[in-house]
Image: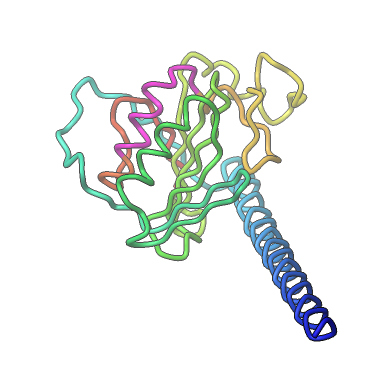
Amino acid sequence: MYSEYDSIGKEQIKTATELAYAEVIGYNRKNLERKLQNESRQRNRQQSRTNREKIMELKIIPRKAEIPAFDPKAIKLQHISYFDYPYNEYEGEEITEAVIAEVLRKIPSGLNIYLSLVPDGEDSWLEINCDGEWLSIWYWSQDGEDNYFLYNPSFADTADRIEEADFSDETIYTPLNSGGQTPIPKLNAITDIETGVKAVEYFIRTGEFYPGIDWLHEF
C-alpha cells in the first residue's frame, strides 16, 4: 500500500513539475515573441527617422478647438499588446469596456502599450509611452509609409538638433523610450497627461487622431 501511495505521490510531483516546466517554456516563448516583435517595431521607428531625413514629406497638423462628438462605447481596436510585464494581450472580442478602462486608468501612473486597428497587431498601431510626467504617442501604418507623431510646438526649435544630440541631453529628450530602447524627443511628447489620455480614448473609440493636440504627419 505504501508503495502504491509513494508511486501516486511521485506521479503528482512529476505532473506538477511538467506543468511548471511547460509554463516556463510558454512564458519564455511569449517573451521571445514579444522581443522579436518589439525589435521589428524599433527597426520600423529607426527607418521612419531615416525616411524623414530623406524622401518622406512632413506636415504639421495644428490642434483644433472643437472636438467632434463620438460614441463613448464604440471600440475600433482589434489588438492590444502591453509592452510591460505581465505582457497581456487582447484580440477582437476580448477587448471589452473593462479592458479599455484598465488601459486608460493605468496611463497616468506610467504605461507602455500598443493599440492596433488590425487583428494581428502588426500594422496600424498606436504606441503610447508614459512615465507619469511625459506622454508620447506614435502611429505606424502602411509599412511605415503613413505615420503620425504627437507634436509639441513648444519644442519646435529643437527639431534640427534631435539627430545630433546626445540622448542624455535633457533639453532635447524625455526620459521615455519607445519599446524600451529608442529615446523619445520632447518634440514628440507632452506633459499634459490628461489630454494625452483623451487622445488615446479618442483613437480607441474612433480609430482616428484626436484633434485636441498637434500632430506631425509623415508620409
Query: Residue at the spot x=14%, y=34% of the render?
Result: 69
Q: Can the viewer see residue 132 in this picture?
A: yes
Whether the magenta-drawn stretch holds residue 199 is answered as yes
Q: Residue furthest front?
A: 1
Name the quadrant containing residue 150.
Answer: top left
Which quadrant, please, contains the N terminus? bottom right
Whether the magenta-drawn stretch holds residue 219 is answered as no
Q: Position of residue 70 (x, y in %)?
A: 17, 39
Query: Residue at the spot x=48%, y=50% of the render?
Result: 140
Q: Position of residue 121 (x, y in %)?
A: 47, 59
Horizontal side, residue 173 vs residue 145: left or right: right
In the rendered image, the vertical position of residue 23 relative to residue 184, given as above or below: below
Query: Residue at the spot x=44%, y=49% of the render?
Result: 115
Q: Position of residue 159 (x, y in %)?
A: 58, 24
The coloring applied to the image is: rainbow
In the rendered image, the vertical position of residue 2 relative to residue 22, given as above or below: below
- Which span is picked out in magenta? 190-202
Q: Can the viewer see residue 54 in this picture?
A: no
Horizontal side, residue 96 vs residue 190: left or right: left
Of residues 29 and 187, the one drawn nearer to the viewer in this rendering: 29
**Main secondary structure type of the part rendered in magenta:** helix
Of residues 14 and 174, the one drawn nearer to the viewer in this rendering: 14
Name the quadrant containing residue 25.
Answer: bottom right
Q: Position of residue 193 (x, y in %)?
A: 44, 21
Numbered disc total: 0
